[in-house]
Amino acid sequence: MLALAAGAVSGLLARRPRATAGELRPPGALPPGSFERACIGCFRCAEVCPTRAIRFPGGAGLDAGHPFLALRESACVLCMACTEACPTGALVRIPAIPERVANEVRIGVPVLDRRACLPWSGEGVCRLCAYVCPVGSRAVELVGPQQAPLFHPEGCVGCGLCEEACPEEARAIRIAPANARPGGRA
């Protein structure tokens, strides 16, 4: 009987949706592999997310898969509630102290398409990414007469506030996984 139950659980786990290489994990996520082994898909991180940036790819329970961030739709406000709610340690607890968040959180890195960016392309003036950045010039500074954004991936937490703020007609910024090559400084 125990072997039958173990086989059923094994079959359910095999059907869990796999993470794709381009998915961004919530703040405090363990490294790939460790995160997937520790996360039980309980939805607690998504339930406490005030912006609803944390999503799940599948259905419910064991078929839910693992949480990811949908930063294009809603940015992470770095409240760290998800890290407090995680019962398994898949998300390491990080206090919502700005200095700790800036030093410990690395969700992803900004990738800028200069051809689409209004100041870089000469199509207009826009400083929204710099205005909304919670870590300021450590992650993005404005350069040149057009005050174009220059991103510093090593100083960025990857919250996606810049991606969310980027005007609809430009959509020049996206947050890529931290282990992805950001395309150099943009």
Image (cartoon, helix red, strand yellow):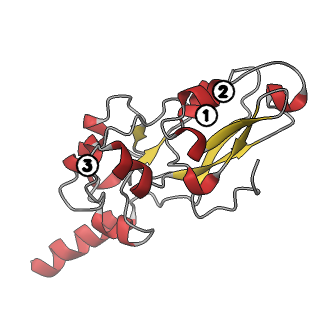
Instruction: Answer with the quarter of the image where residue 141 lies.
Output: top right
Q: Where residue 132 appears, x then y in whole percent?
A: 54, 28
As displayed, is residue 162 above or below residue 2?
above
Mark positioned earlier in the residue sequence (3 or 1): 3
As displayed, is residue 178 above or below residue 45?
below
- Mark 2 → mark 3, Cα distance in angstroms: 28 Å
Q: Where residue 49 appears, x then y in whole percent?
A: 31, 35
Q: Is residue 85 left or right of residue 39?
A: left
Mark positioned earlier in the residue sequence (2 or 3): 3
Q: Residue under circle 3?
A: 95
In this view, which residue lies farthest toward the right? Answer: 122
Question: Residue drawn 21% across and 48% down?
Answer: 84
* Circle 1/circle 2 CB separation < 8 Å: yes
Residue 23 visible in the snapshot: no
* Three-letter residue code for mark 2: Cys
- Mark 1 → mark 2, Cα distance in angstroms: 5 Å
Q: Where residue 85 appears, x then y in whole percent?
A: 20, 47
* Circle 2/circle 3 CB separation < 8 Å: no
Assess disc 2: are there few (<14), some (14-19) or many (≥20) residues with their C-alpha within 10 Å of its C-alpha.
many
Question: Residue drawn 74% across and 34% down?
Answer: 172
Callout 3 secondary element: loop
* Three-letter residue code for mark 3: Pro
Q: Where residue 25 appears, x then y in whole percent?
A: 44, 53
Question: For the residues carrying marks 3 and 1, which lies nearer the camera in this image?
Answer: 3
Q: Residue under circle 1?
A: 163
Q: Which mark is residue 166?
A: 2
